[in-house]
Image: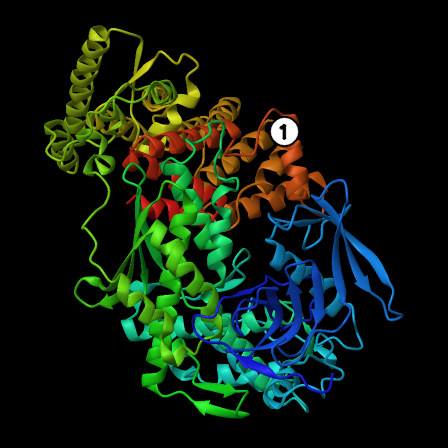
């Protein structure tokens, strides 16, 4: 073709960008447009490549009768060729199946693919292996266009626009874009983020700048990385680093960097600076992902200008996810059954976890700090996220049409930040509606920092589901090609400005157990060994008179230890008598137990086989007084008399780690190592906290050593988590044990786990505990007991380290 002109897209022109196909070249975007050149009764659509922000180049014409022709101009300017370049041939006996025929160089038509579906309905490719077109069903025009791209355009190396080797026929603007984004093979691969996972952040940035500055011929990606990093005030960053520890994490699902730091130690300007640095890292990472390098050394690179084009596209493309998100509404929820109990489809757990999963995977270059609330019964959601930092936006933009760089002043960057936030808001609304078909309304709020209140709402948008699907989704598809300067999304959202209610959730779902007198559903009663929510309270009232007596006796002990001991003994007798009366008055089997926190209470039922048993809360003062009695004997080193008292403490709090530790400490002083093994193994059955697990393995290792079970002792030492309080002592003792055994290397983690497994021990937290917490969390959320659910979910998050659980937990607060 002699020339390939480009055509300007208007704001409301119907168009669709296709997700990337495996066959297409990097850095390109393809799709279809409809009625761009007026009414044509024979036209289904045009196949196009999107050029720059608002232009297309024509590649093909899809007719309504099954033919596709190569074109570079609309049919109103140049007639179609006599013969099609691709054709759909339907089976004569079954019009729901057919073949795709493509024209070869000699003019003959060759079958290249099988199809299922009819032109009146969705179509897809039928293949023995998964292809882009077999994995999705598309309307006739989009299906034919995508097949044409894959089997004709991308396969035609001589004529295809996919080939950048000979693009001389393109118009000047398009030629320039292709030249700039074209990947050039590098003499040696370049690792842009070298050292960022090990060195302090200021050093990693300064080292990157040094490497590029001293490179003989730096690549485009290196030059762009240096340009971004040179915008950072390194001396100020070092000052901030001295105030707050920083660590750079990588989130695999979203392919984003996350800069960890302590906000409480910094002022807002310092926080904003760190968030802007994080954004620069993610903008750079986005370019590397786009050219196919990711975090591995890049073997090829676009030009400096090409990197700028990719960078601007990455910021502008935020709403590209909207159609994809809405398509996930009917997909399976991986969090539907985290334990042994499934959530209610379309219930609170289902909707909240779907939303968290969607948002945690979004590739948004700015920090997406968000909270959300849900009321499934009312079909409403509210999402709030923090506004973008202006300094995170680019300081320069490359204009491919003018082949010139443009400086972006503070006002322009503020416009970009506001437009970016509007696009994020539009995307989060899609996430709300994708979280469940029951969600028919949503509020999306943008929050700004506030020195007095912490944050203030800067904007609120309200969307109804039907209006969003009809009016907003088409806009979301087109925003990528629209100038950020014009604020097209923000202008669209002006029609959706609103105010949100103070809360969308009923107050009862956030009630503390002591104030919540609702009856638990049957499944939760058996799971938690309680009939009402208030039976799960573990905290004593602030003005409890018995706790006040404990405080008085502790003060007395400073001057009269013996008198205080007698007072504690009388208090224990009095409270035990009260507990005995409560047990006698119970109408069913009960146990009196002390739980030092809500998590301990949730795990307690793991130790009980009889699901008809109900737990009566032991008074705090009873546990505290009994603990003081144990301490009295321990201070006198009268461990024989301390032992029955500490056993009594242990029986009173069977799921408490502190009672296990107290008993182990006394048994250790008496060198009763067999009994230490028994108590430590019991503790590991219910332990879920990392530090508690570490301490139990540490004491278990020493006990096994003294019982001449050296392999087991070595395995237990190896399983003490590094960095915990007992970690350094465990390493020192393990080395001594290895010397005694004549072993030079400790077992691997896997070998240690296998050793304890053969001894009947599981690596904690054991499935019984994780399932207990997961099952409780799911059912508590679905039934509206959010306060109780949060403790379970928080521990699940600590154990699994999954950001979706952290998001879910925040949504319940």
Q: Quadrant of residue 509?
A: top left
**Residue drawn at 53 percent across, 22 percent down:** 674
Can you say which quadrant of the picture contains the C terminus? Answer: top left
* Residue beneath disc 1: 757
* Residue 465 x, y percent position in the rendering: 35, 50
Residue drawn at x 37%, y 73% is 488
Instruction: Check the image and report above or below for 103 versus 571.
Output: below
* Whether residue 668 is visible: no
Q: Residue furthest front?
A: 41
**Which percent across, then down, holds residue 92?**
77, 44
Can you say whether 554 is above or below 238 in the image?
A: above
Which quadrant, please, contains the N terminus?
bottom right
Q: Secondary structure at mark 1?
A: helix
- Taking depth in this image into account, of 230 and 560 the one nearest to the observer is 230
The picture places residue 467, in percent across and down from the top left corner, at 34, 54
Whether residue 689 is visible here, answered yes or no, is: yes
x%, y% of residue 416? 38, 77
* Residue located 72% across and 88% down the image: 168
Question: In the rendered view, would you say 641 is above or below 51?
Answer: above
């Amino acid at each position: 073709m002699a020339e390939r002109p480009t055509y300007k897209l208007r704001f409301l022109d119907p168009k669709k960008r296709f997700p990337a196909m495996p066959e297409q070249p990097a850095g390109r975007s393809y799709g279809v447009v409809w009625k761009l050149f007026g009414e044509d009764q024979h036209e289904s659509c045009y196949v196009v490549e999107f050029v720059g922000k608002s232009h297309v180049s024509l590649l093909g014409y899809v007719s309504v009768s099954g033919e596709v022709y190569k074109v570079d101009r609309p049919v109103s300017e140049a007639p179609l060729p006599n013969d099609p370049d691709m054709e759909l041939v339907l089976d004569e006996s079954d019009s729901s199946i057919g073949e795709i025929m493509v024209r070869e160089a000699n003019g003959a038509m060759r079958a290249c693919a099988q199809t299922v579906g009819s032109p009146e309905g969705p179509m897809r490719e039928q293949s023995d292996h998964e292809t882009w077109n077999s994995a999705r069903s598309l309307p006739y025009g989009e299906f034919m266009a995508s097949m044409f791209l894959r089997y004709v355009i991308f396969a035609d190396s001589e004529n295809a626009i996919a080939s950048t080797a000979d693009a001389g026929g393109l118009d000047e603007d398009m030629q320039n874009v292709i030249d700039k984004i074209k990947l050039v093979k590098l003499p040696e691969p370049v690792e842009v983020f070298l050292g960022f996972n090990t060195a302090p952040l200021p050093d990693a940035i300064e080292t990157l700048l040094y490497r590029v500055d001293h490179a003989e011929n730096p690549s485009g990606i290196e030059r762009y990385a240096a340009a971004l990093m040179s915008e950072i005030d390194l001396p100020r960053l070092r000052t901030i680093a001295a105030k707050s520890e920083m660590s750079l994490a990588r989130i695999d699902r979203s392919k984003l960097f996350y800069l960890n730091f302590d906000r409480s130690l910094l002022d807002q300007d310092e926080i904003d600076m760190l968030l802007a640095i994080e954004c620069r890292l993610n903008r750079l990472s986005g370019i590397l992902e786009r050219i196919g390098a990711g975090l591995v050394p890049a073997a090829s690179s676009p030009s400096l200008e090409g990197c700028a084009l990719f960078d601007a596209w990455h910021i502008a493309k935020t709403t590209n996810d909207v159609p994809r998100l809405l398509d996930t509404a009917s997909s399976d929820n991986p969090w539907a059954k985290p334990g042994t109990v499934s959530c209610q489809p379309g219930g609170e757990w289902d909707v909240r976890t779907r939303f968290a999963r969607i948002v945690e995977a979004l590739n948004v270059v700015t920090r997406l700090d968000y909270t959300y609330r849900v009321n499934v019964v009312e079909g409403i959601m509210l999402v709030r996220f923090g506004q973008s930092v202006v300094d995170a936006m680019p300081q320069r933009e490359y204009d491919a049409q003018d082949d010139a760089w443009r400086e972006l002043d503070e006002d322009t960057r503020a416009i970009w930040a506001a437009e970016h936030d509007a696009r994020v808001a539009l995307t989060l609304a899609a996430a709300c509606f994708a979280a469940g078909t029951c969600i028919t309304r949503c509020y999306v709020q943008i929050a700004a920092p506030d020195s007095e209140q912490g944050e203030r709402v800067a904007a609120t948008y309200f969307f109804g589901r039907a209006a969003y699907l009809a009016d907003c989704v088409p806009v979301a598809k087109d925003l990528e090609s629209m100038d950020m300067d014009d604020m097209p999304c923000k202008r669209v959202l002006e029609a959706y400005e609103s105010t949100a209610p103070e809360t969308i959730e009923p107050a009862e779902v956030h009630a503390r157990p002591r104030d919540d007198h609702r009856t638990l559903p049957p499944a939760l009663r058996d799971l938690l060994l309680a009939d009402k929510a208030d039976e799960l309270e573990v905290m004593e009232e602030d003005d409890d008179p018995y706790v006040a007596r404990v405080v008085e006796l502790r003060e007395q002990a400073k001057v009269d230890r013996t008198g205080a001991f007698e007072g504690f003994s009388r208090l224990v007798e009095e409270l035990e008598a009260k507990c005995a009366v409560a047990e006698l008055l119970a109408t069913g089997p009960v146990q009196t137990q002390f739980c030092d926190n809500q998590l301990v209470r949730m795990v307690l039922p793991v130790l009980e086989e009889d699901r008809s048993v109900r737990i009566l809360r032991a008074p705090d003062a009873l546990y505290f007084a009994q603990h003081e009695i144990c301490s009295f004997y321990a201070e006198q080193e009268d461990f024989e008399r301390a032992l029955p008292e500490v056993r009594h403490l242990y029986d009173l709090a069977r799921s408490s780690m502190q009672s296990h530790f107290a008993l182990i400490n006394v048994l250790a002083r008496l060198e009763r190592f067999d009994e230490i093994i028994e108590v430590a193994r019991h503790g590991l059955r219910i332990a879920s906290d990392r530090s508690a697990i570490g301490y139990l393995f540490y004491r278990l290792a020493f006990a096994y050593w003294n019982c001449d079970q050296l392999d087991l002792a070595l395995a237990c030492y190896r399983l003490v988590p590094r960095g915990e309080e007992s970690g350094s002592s465990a390493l020192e003792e393990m080395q001594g044990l290895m010397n005694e055994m004549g072993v030079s290397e400790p077992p691997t983690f896997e070998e240690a786990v296998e050793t304890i497994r053969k001894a009947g021990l599981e690596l904690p937290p054991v499935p019984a505990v994780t399932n207990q917490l997961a099952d409780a969390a799911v059912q508590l959320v679905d039934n509206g007991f959010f306060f109780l659910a949060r403790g379970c979910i928080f521990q699940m998050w600590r154990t699994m380290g999954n950001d979706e659980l952290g998001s879910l937990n925040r949504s319940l607060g």
